[in-house]
Each structure stands twice: as structure tokens, then as C-alpha cells.
Image (cartoon, helix red, strand yellow):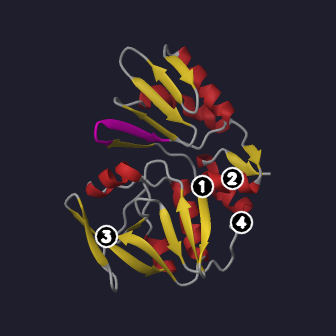
Amino acid sequence: MLSFRVHGLEIGQRHYLLLPKMTPKQMRLLAGRLEGAGYSVRQGDSLSARSRESTIHVAPSGICWSTTDPSDAILPAIPDILTCEKERVPVRDLESIYLTRRRLGAGSLVRISTRIESASLWDSLRASDGCGLAPDEHAVASSLIKKSAGDCEVLTDFPADDSVPMICGRKRYYHSRLGCTLAAETLRSVRAKGPRNSYLFRSGVLKLGRLERLDLDWFELSEELGDWCSFAPA
């Protein structure tokens, strides 16, 4: 089971904290804590907390960002957030938090929904040799890759047969086709960098071979996600 551990990243002019995927109750709890600390709080699809020094944004998908380090404001609320009971949701709703997929001939295209490993932030992370794939996102992606038969297309920092090189900043990477076991073993997360690393593409899309078992066991996987996901299958 994945325990929560603070992961903060500075990308460009912004500071980011990776947080658990939060329920409405947890978002209200966090808003109350910030208001108690003197912030002016507004809630919509995400939470904005304003003070004279900075504005902090928090999305329930599990990402916090600000132009100044938000740790002192956010982290004291984490123990209370983690003690909240998980919200039970239908399996398909839980899956939709993490991925969307469609058939591609005999294979599948799966898009992993990531906190910061996408779009322009993906470019910055690759150029700086960083990684922001959260532990729960890594668990879901690697579980899917392991269930796939054949090969998987990923970005790597090492060459494989027929790899196509590409440059991000001053870093060299490769568009590679790996066996699924190797792709899952080398998939990098925010927790650690290995001697050889693979990454999701900028779009978050995994091009997989045939999935031997189409559906993930979300009851089992939910236990593995631990503190990083505040939802559980009903």
C-alpha cells in the first residue's frame, strides 16, 4: 500500500506539491484550514487561497501550485486529510479518474490522467531530467502495461532496437518499443530515478498490445493506491 510522502517540484516560476486525489469533504476541510490561517478562500472546480504574499491553487485531482512555496500552508492539513474515510464510487467512476481507453485494432490506446506529467510541464520535466509521475499514477500505468501482451511504446533515456532519438532541452531521449515487462520495470516515478528509465509520452497515451485481461482489478488496485487516492470502488 502506498503511503503518502511529500513530493514538491519547482518548474519554471512555479512551485508544485503532489497531493492525494481528494474528495469534496477533504477539499472543504483544506479550505477551512486555510481560512483559519488567514487566507481568503474561493472554491469552484479548484480552490484558490489568497494572502498578501501569494495565491495558492489546489485541484481535487491532487495538485497544488503557487508562485511561492505553498508547503507551510498546505502540509499541516495533510494528517487530517489522510484520516478521512474514503469515498465509495462505482468502479467505472474510479477508473475514469485515472484513465480513458479505446480499441486500436488488436491493441488498445490508453490515456493516463496525470497531475503534471503532460503538456508544457512534461517538456520542462524532460528538459531538466526530472519526473512528476505520482506514485498512484505509476501504479495504474505499470499495472496496465503488465497486463498487455506484446510490446509497449514509451519514451526512454536509453536506446533500444529501432529507437528514434529526440531532444528535450539538452537531454537526449528515444521513442522506443519495449517488451511490456521491461517497460513496466523501467517506468520512472517521482519517487526515484533508476539506471534506465522509461516515461509516458507528452499526451499521456500508452499504445499497448492486446490486453490479456481487459479490466484492471480496481478492488485490488485501490488497496495498493493507499493514501494517494481518497476514493474506493463501491
Residue at (65% x, 54% y) in the render: 96
Image x and y of residue 124, in percent: 30, 51
Q: Mark 2 points at which residue?
A: 94
Q: Distance between the residues labelled 1 and 2?
A: 7 Å
Instruction: State which region is magenta.
Output: 11-18
The residue type indicated by label 3 comes to Asp
Is 13 magenta? The answer is yes
User: Are discs 1 and 3 less than 8 Å apart at CB?
Assistant: no
> Pointer 4: what residue?
217
Q: Is mark 3 on a helix, strand or loop?
A: loop
Question: Could you tell me which quadrant the N terminus lies in?
Answer: bottom right
Residue at position x 48%, y 48% in the image: 115
Disc 1 from disc 3: Cα separation: 25 Å
Toward the viewer: 217 or 95? Answer: 95
- Camera-near label (1 vs 4) is 1
Q: How crowded is mark 4: few (under 14 residues within 10 Å), some or many (20 or more)?
A: few
Residues marked 2 and 3 touching at CB (< 8 Å): no
Q: Which residue appears farthest toward the front when viewing the image? A: 105
Report the mark closest to the observer, 2 or 4.
2
- At label 4, the amino acid type is Asp
Circle 1 Cα neighbour tier, 10 Å, few/some/many (<14 / 14–19 / ≥20): some
> Disc 2 or disc 3, which is closer to the eye?
2
Question: With respect to residue 9, does 35 lie above or below?
Answer: above
Q: Is mark 2 on a helix, strand or loop?
A: helix
Query: Which residue is the site of mark 1?
Result: 98
The residue wearing badge 3 is 157
Between the residue at mark 2 and the residue at mark 3, the CA separation in whole angstroms equals 32 Å
Q: Distance between the residues labelled 1 and 4?
A: 14 Å
Q: Does the magenta stretch include residue 27?
A: no
Q: Can residue 217 be seen in this view?
A: yes
Q: Comparing marks 1 and 3, which lies closer to the viewer?
A: 1
